[in-house]
Image: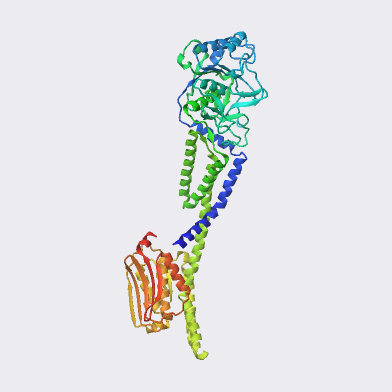
Amino acid sequence: MRSRLWRRIQEEIAILRVGALPGIVVITLVIIARLTGFMQSLEWLAFDSFLRLRPDEPIEQRIVLVGINEDDIRTRKKYAVDSPISDRDLAQLLFKLQTYKPRVIGLDIYRDLPVNPGHAELVAAFSNLKNLIAIEKVLPDEIAPPPKLSPKQIGFADQIIDTDGKLRRSLLGTPTPKGYKFSLSVRLAEVYLAHERITLENGNRDRAAMRFGNTELPRFLTNSGGYVRTDAGGVQVLLNFRSGRERFRTLSLHALKNEQFNPDWIRDRIVIIGITSPSRKDFITTSAIESIKPATGRVYGLEIQAHAVSQIISAALDSRPMLNTWLDVWEYIWIVAWGFLGIVSARLTKSPLINLLVVGLASFSLVFVSYLLLIWGWWIPVIPALIVLALNGVELTALYQHDQALRLGIKARQAIIERTFETIHNGPQQNLAKVLKLVRDRDVPINELLPEIEQELEKLNHELRGIYEFLQREPLNQDISLYLGKSLVLNLQDPLHEILYQVYNHTLEREFPCFKTIRIKIRNFEPIDERHLTIEQKRSLCRFLEEALCNVGKHATGVTRLEVNCSSFEGWYTLSITDDGLGISSSTEGRGTQQFRNLARQFKGKFRRVSLSPRGTLCELSWSIKRFWLW
């Protein structure tokens, strides 16, 4: 049992080795392509698609956007500086917002230069409003912050755009020649969370990261997620946009001026002021969320600031997940695992159609699991894993089937060789052995032996010609016949007990010396349930009977009784040949005995050849009915 299992394991290893090498090559090439950045755009595309397909989230109640839109701009004249709002109007807006007691106000409009009229009024507003955070630009070209604001009231508005022109990351802090600077989103979140007694600190696991209370913001690294050798300067995080059509409540300048809103929308909230006018082109391109109608694929910069603030306060207060990534080693283990799954699925599936179904289900599972993990805050490599799974699963199926065809061809060829040998061994070779025995055993002049030798050689010639004609007539790879000599061909599709009886009769008619002394012949061939017997198995049983009877005819000296029985008893089929001759005294096994033992292994049964007392030999093959049915 162990030897059969070990042989089976060795066969499977040999077969897997055929697909393992090209499969490993595919995995290696995909990994190299990923390391060199060729898959970066595809992984970004999958990342954006997953973010866009997430379930809608409720509107962010803690943030209100005040957008200066196209209608607001049309009601005002152009100022000396190309700005949508004057300093006086902006100062009035800030003081009016302050009356509704927001927790913090963010001004996402650059004010490094005066926009008269009203510059003095705006400077006074900057001096008086301590919960105001304004913006500056630090990278790469600088834009100064408004005057009269303390460093803690200033945050930069710089965004990091990927090489495809889209935004996926948020820069939270960066060193500059004028010291370390924080973004507008961090400054707004810091003021808002301070009222919840949550302060900004360094990370615990990563000292370079930022932490709000117990929430550590996972820092973007140079190879995070689908990125390859990306500039990770400063402190960056992946931007986990809020999903849905209505992410934030937006008020226009006109609605605010005319008090066309609920004051509770502003009280104790984060208010961010910015431009929502298509003509001002304050857009940022992204595919992760639904874009604004006037500019497909783009989102106002004001809303981007709101997303950046929202993900921080939502993580700190609501445990909303930030976007994390695995370590590089785990990402590549993940890719390799899916590649080997493709290799194994190609080996286990038997048809291209089933293989396509298995690969399709596995690919769907991979995409679905990756999607779920992203919802839970983990970005894992889906595109490389999908490629190695599909390539190895589909491509290697053809390779395995070609290898299987070669193996079946070799097996069929071996079967042809074995069957041809059996035909020759049980026919012409027996006649040849008889001629040799005549020459060796008889101590008579050669001229007296010549007629008998000539007669036997003529029989041998006839047998060989008969085999040749049989092989020419019916190719062995489609053989359903059994050749027994003297042009006798049996149809193996006939009932087995009838075929065995014909083999028995034909063999006993052969001119073996020991057959001449047999006086008693007992035979019993019971019908056998052969629904699960193949043609090859029926042929093997016939050759077993023929070989066993030939051995009796050649070696059972003095035999007078021959009994052949094929019957079932207590769940076993038994084919036995018993004689009362002297038998073979040699202790070495011939080829026939070795074939019998191989046959017993094929049938998962037993073979035995034993000497009987006081004389005789039993040759018996038996196999379990139950095991055979399960086989």
Q: Nearer the viewer, residue 631 or 458?
A: 631
Q: Does the rendering let one see residue 12?
A: yes
Where residue 494 sits, quadrant-wise, is bottom left
Q: Nearer the viewer, residue 115 or 480?
A: 115
Q: Nearer the viewer, residue 130 or 272?
A: 130
Where residue 505 sits, quadrant-wise, is bottom left
Q: Does the rendering let one see residue 86?
A: no
Looking at the rendered image, the quarter that the N terminus falls into is bottom left
Looking at the rendered image, the quarter that the C terminus falls into is bottom left
The answer to whether residue 93 is left or right of residue 507 is right
Where residue 226 sits, quadrant-wise, is top right
Q: Residue at x 45, y 61 (%)?
A: 2
Residue 615: where, in percent of width, then height? 38, 81
Residue 521: where, in percent of width, then height? 34, 79
Q: How many marks?
A: 0
Note whether 92 is above or below 51 in the view shown: above
Residue 331: where, in percent of width, then height? 55, 41
Q: Residue at x 59, y 34 (%)?
A: 221
